[in-house]
Image: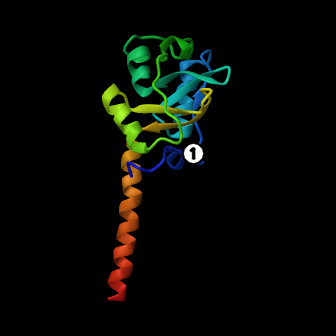
């Protein structure tokens, strides 16, 4: 699993995005629609930042700001660590661990978004491998 390429993990997975001028409520709706805990903020086709559930809690709820009036650009994290699609997934997990964050945007060489990795992808990937192993064991048990 750690050696699996990132492109294999994000393959055919839609990427949640928002513009910096979108409202925070719009970003939250996008998160719900994509079943994602973060949204990439894209400006002129390039990743300009990220907004996470944590940003919504601390930047809006705890600060008593209006999500209908506040723009995504006001609460987004601007300095974002990104990764390319041809790196191993273990590299992304290492970046998350070292940086203390749970999401890594996947971008091409120009910074255009290709996908979004989350720490929980490690669990999702492990569960697929476990399920395949269980099926294999069942098949062997039936043969014996």
Q: At 59% across and 26% down in the image, what residue appears? A: 111
Count of marks overlaid on the render: 1
Between 129 and 67, the one nearer to me in the picture:
129
Q: Quadrant of the C terminus?
A: bottom left
Above or below, comparing residue 19 to residue 1 in the picture: above
Where does the image place residue 15, in percent across and percent down from the top left?
58, 37
Instruction: State the residue lying farthest toward the right.
Output: 44
Where does the image place residue 91, in percent across and percent down from the top left?
39, 39
Q: At 57% across and 48% down in the image, what residue appears? A: 11
Q: At 52% across and 42% down in the image, what residue appears? A: 86
Q: Residues within 10 Å of mark 1 (few under 14, many from 20)?
A: few
Where does the image place residue 4, in percent across and percent down from the top left?
44, 50
Where does the image place residue 110, in percent across and percent down from the top left?
62, 27
Which residue bears the numbered disc 1?
13
Q: At 62% across and 29% down in the image, what residue appears? A: 112
* Image quadrant in which you'd find residue 41: top right
**Residue 67 seen in this snapshot:** yes
User: SS at mark 1?
Assistant: loop
Between 93 and 54, the one nearer to me in the picture:
93
């Amino acid at each position: 699993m750690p050696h699996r390429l990132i492109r294999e993990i994000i393959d055919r997975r839609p990427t949640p995005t928002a513009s910096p001028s979108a409202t925070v409520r719009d970003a939250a709706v996008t998160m719900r629609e994509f079943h994602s805990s973060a949204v990439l903020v894209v400006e002129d086709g390039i990743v300009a930042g990220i907004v996470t559930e944590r940003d919504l809690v601390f930047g809006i709820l705890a600060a008593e700001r209006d999500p209908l009036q506040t723009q995504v650009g006001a609460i987004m994290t601007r300095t974002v660590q990104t990764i390319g699609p041809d790196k191993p997934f273990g590299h992304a997990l290492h970046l998350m661990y070292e940086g203390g964050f749970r999401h890594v945007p996947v971008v091409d060489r120009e910074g255009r978004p290709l996908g979004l990795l989350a720490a929980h992808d490690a669990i999702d990937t492990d569960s697929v491998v476990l399920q395949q192993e269980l099926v294999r064991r069942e098949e062997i048990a039936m043969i014996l």
